[in-house]
Amino acid sequence: MFNVTILRMKDIVKIIVGTILTIFIIFIICKFYNKKTILSKNSLLLCLDKTVPVIENINKEYKTIANEDDPKDKSILQIMLKTQISSIKGMEEIEIKEKNENKKEENHDEDNLQNEQVNSENELAKTGLQTQVITNNPIRDSSNTEYGNVKIKNETSYNLTEEMLKPDIKIENKNILIFHTHTCESYTPSEKYQYTQTGTFRTTDLNFSVSRVGTELENALKQYNLNVVHNTNYHDYPSYNGSYTRSLETVENILKTNPSDIIIDLHRDAIGSRSDYAPIVKIGDVDEAAQIMFVIGTNEGGLWHPNWNQNLKFAVKVQEKAEELYPGLFKPMMVTKSRYNQHTGKYACIMEVGATGNTLDQCLTSMKYLAKVIDEVLK
């Protein structure tokens, strides 16, 4: 038993001595390689440089910064942080540059739009031009009453006599108020006027809605030295219901400081069954203009409206002059039972410019000729 125990102790001693020698040899090797800088603190970075070329560029930047700064005061973490901050600043500069470029593009677009409006102001409508209705997809215009060349679709039970239609009015207050109960109504996009719809033939972008048509009419009327107020408030957004209640409040507030007898609620024809319906009249050799339609309300719906007959006479007077200068510019007017806030003025009306199938180009062209007609009426 004793001999067996001595043999086991020898084995254990051998293992311990062998382990110590192995550790000693490894220590000597590590020390030797450390002097050769093979396992120096930069060896990992050197390997990364060779393996990933992008890292080499970053490491060069670290070295540059390390050379510029005092290595005693700057740790490698601080150097890396400085490099990353530099990179972030570079990214911010790029972002700022891109924003400035985008802003320049937006300003350029706005300048183009303003220049276009200025250019349109230089084009007064000429008279003595040939006109022709060229609607390719017509909806039959029906009328049941006429006064001279003015056709009327009477949807009320009133008998519109010649006395009621005779435009024997004298317009003393020539201030004009333009607004839009349905501000977001828009048209078929054209090559020149592309826009993002926010509904079926609707947009909140005032540069492409019926509001833009109102701006064109405003500018055209001002060329004849007429006083015009154009309101572009949204009355049908975000909610369509209650549009007339909101537009009534707008009109009444404006009239407190800008009394006006002529009040135009500018719309687009809302025919829903034919989205391609585009009533057009060709004026002269080039211009294609969207046709316009008067909508005149009455008190037959039960709402107080004592001056609806005055409104009707005004519409007849304007359309009569339009038939004289540009036959076909107006479609037959509609006389309805509803009031449409037209009790607010002596000569208040709805004018529907074009329909969903018309382009904004055609509607803008119409305003040049409508302005000429109104100017002639007010002389």
Image (tube, rainbow, N blue to C red):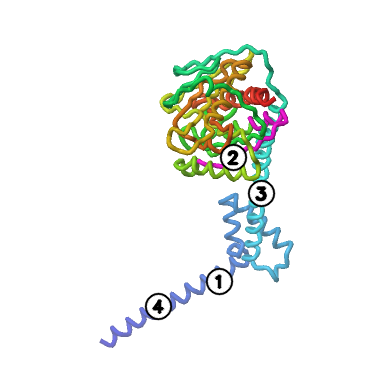
Asked whether 71 or 375 is in front, the reply is: 375
Element under label 3? helix
Q: Quadrant of residue 302?
A: top left
- Measure how far apart labels 1 and 3 are at the Cα level: 57 Å
**Residue located beneath label 2 in the image:** 232
Going by the numbered disc 4, the residue's amino acid type is: Lys
Looking at the rendered image, the quarter that the N terminus falls into is: bottom left
Say above or below: 306 vs 356: below
Label annotation for residue 28: 1
Q: Which residue is mark 3?
A: 96
Residue 176 located within the stretch drawn in magenta: no
Q: In the image, residue 44 lies at what x, y percent? A: 57, 60
Identity of the amino acid at label 3? Answer: Ile
Q: Which residues are magenta?
A: 217-235
Q: Residue 106, percent across and down?
A: 65, 39
- Is there a contact, CB below 8 Å, between mark 4 and mark 3? no
Residue marked by disc 4: 14
N-terminal label among 2 and 4:
4
Q: Is residue 355 left or right of residue 321?
A: left
User: In front here: 205 or 354?
Assistant: 354
Assess disc 1: are there few (<14), some (14-19) or many (≥20) residues with their C-alpha within 10 Å of its C-alpha: few
Label 2 neighbour load within 10 Å: few <14, some 14-19, many 20+: some
Whichever of callouts 4 and 1 sits on the residue coming sooner in the sequence is 4
